[in-house]
Each structure stands twice: as structure tokens, then as C-alpha cells.
Image (cartoon, rainbow, N blue to C red):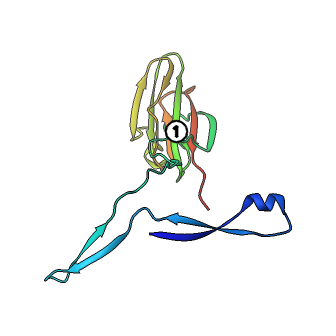
């Protein structure tokens, strides 16, 4: 099936900038789809002439593509001793968090670090939460990718936790 398309003649516009000239260009439709006769159930059969050309398509998004986070917050916190004050908040609640990466520095003699998503279970001298016991040194915690905030207390003074909190921006 041939249709006629009106296309701007760029050559004449270059030669004659004051004039607008259109030219008629025949366009071939790659397939014709028609409905055949109806059967006893009232359903039609679709017939098509399938001579579709191969058209290159540029892919602009791939779901396997890794896009880096838009924001990153770096912080270092001295951790409170359990029962001697309020728990230290390491990460706030963040809706668009990608990952929070944490490193724990333990002083000589070792320590136990207790982590929770609320400060109340950590406010007593016997804190409740995820307890990690370390000897002296620097240790990496597993990456945290939840939205909830993170709080921590330690069994001894001198424990330091460094946090890299990565997130995506909001769509407005």
C-alpha cells in the first residue's frame, strides 16, 4: 500500500531561503493488516502481509545498568557506652537509601557493639539488638540498605563508627 507523505525539501530551502517548497514522497507501508470473514462464533481472523524491515533501535535504558547513587553523606561517630546516655544515631531514616557502608574502629582490649533500628532497646545497661563482639582493630559491617534509621552503643569507651550513607535523589 503506497501513501504519500509531504516532506520538507531541505535542498531548496538552502538554495532559496525565502521560499517554502514541499515535495511529495511516496512511502511504502511495510504490512497491511485486515480482518478476514467472521466464523460461526463471530470471531474474525487477522491476515497480514509480513514483510517488516529491520529497523535499528537505540536502547536508552537497560535494567541491568548500574547507576551510581546521587548523594553520599560521610560521617564519623564516637559511640556512647551502653547505660551511660542516649544511643548514637549512625544513619537517619532515608527513603531513597542505596546503601550505608560502616566501618568500626575498636580500641585495645576489644568491645561489643550493639546495633538496633530504635534507640529505646539500647538505652539500658543490657542493650537489646544485633550484638557484635570484636577484638582491637578496624572492621567492616555488612552493607545496610533499609530505610530505617540505625543506632548503636558500645560496651567500652573509644569505639568509633564511620559511615558512608549513599542515596538517590527524589523525583519531583
Q: Is 31 placed above or below 110 here?
A: below
Quadrant (top left/top right/bottom left/bottom right) for the C terminus: bottom right
Name the residue nearer the viewer: 106 or 169: 169
Residue 124 visible in the picture: no
* Residue found 84% across the figure and 63% down from its top: 16
Helix or strand or loop: what does disc 1 sit on?
strand
Q: Which residue is mark 1?
A: 100
Write down the quadrant of residue 43 in the picture: bottom left
* Residue found 39% across the figure and 64% down from its top: 31
Write down the quadrant of residue 91 in the picture: top right
Count the numbered circles shown.
1
Report whether 21 appears left or right of 93: right
Residue 34 percent coordinates (x, y): 33, 74
Q: Is 114 placed above or below 134 here?
A: below
Residue 14 visible in the picture: yes
Q: Is 116 placed above or below 36 here?
A: above
Residue 68 percent coordinates (x, y): 56, 40
Report whether 1 appears left or right of 101: left
Q: Is 143 placed above or below 51 here?
A: above
Quadrant (top left/top right/bottom left/bottom right) for the N terminus: bottom left
* Residue found 46% across the figure and 35% down from its top: 143
Report whether 96 appears left or right of 40: right
The local crowd at label 1, few if under 14, some if 14 to 19, many if 20 or more residues have their Cα within 10 Å, is: many
Residue that extends furthest to the left in the rendered view of this protein:
40
Report whether 158 appears left or right of 65: right
Residue 75 percent coordinates (x, y): 63, 36
Residue that extends furthest to the right in the rendered view of this protein:
18
Write down the quadrant of residue 130 in the picture: top left
Amino acid at each position: 500500500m503506497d501513501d504519500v507523505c509531504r516532506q520538507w525539501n531541505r535542498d531548496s530551502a538552502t538554495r532559496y531561503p525565502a521560499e517554502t517548497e514541499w515535495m511529495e514522497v511516496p512511502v511504502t507501508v511495510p504490512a497491511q493488516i485486515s480482518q478476514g470473514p467472521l466464523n460461526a462464533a463471530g470471531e474474525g481472523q487477522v491476515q497480514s502481509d509480513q514483510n517488516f524491515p529491520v529497523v535499528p533501535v537505540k536502547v536508552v535504558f537497560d535494567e541491568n545498568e548500574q547507576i551510581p547513587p546521587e548523594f553520599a553523606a560521610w560521617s564519623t561517630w564516637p559511640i556512647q557506652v551502653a547505660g551511660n546516655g542516649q544511643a548514637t544515631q549512625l544513619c537517619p531514616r532515608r527513603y531513597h537509601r542505596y546503601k550505608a557502608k560502616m566501618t568500626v574502629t575498636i580500641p585495645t582490649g576489644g568491645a561489643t557493639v550493639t546495633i538496633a533500628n530504635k534507640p529505646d532497646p539500647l538505652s539500658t545497661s543490657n542493650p537489646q539488638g544485633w550484638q557484635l563482639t570484636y577484638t582491637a582493630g578496624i572492621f567492616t559491617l555488612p552493607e545496610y540498605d533499609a530505610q530505617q534509621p540505625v543506632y548503636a552503643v558500645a560496651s567500652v569507651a573509644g569505639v568509633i563508627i564511620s559511615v558512608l550513607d549513599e542515596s538517590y535523589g527524589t523525583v519531583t
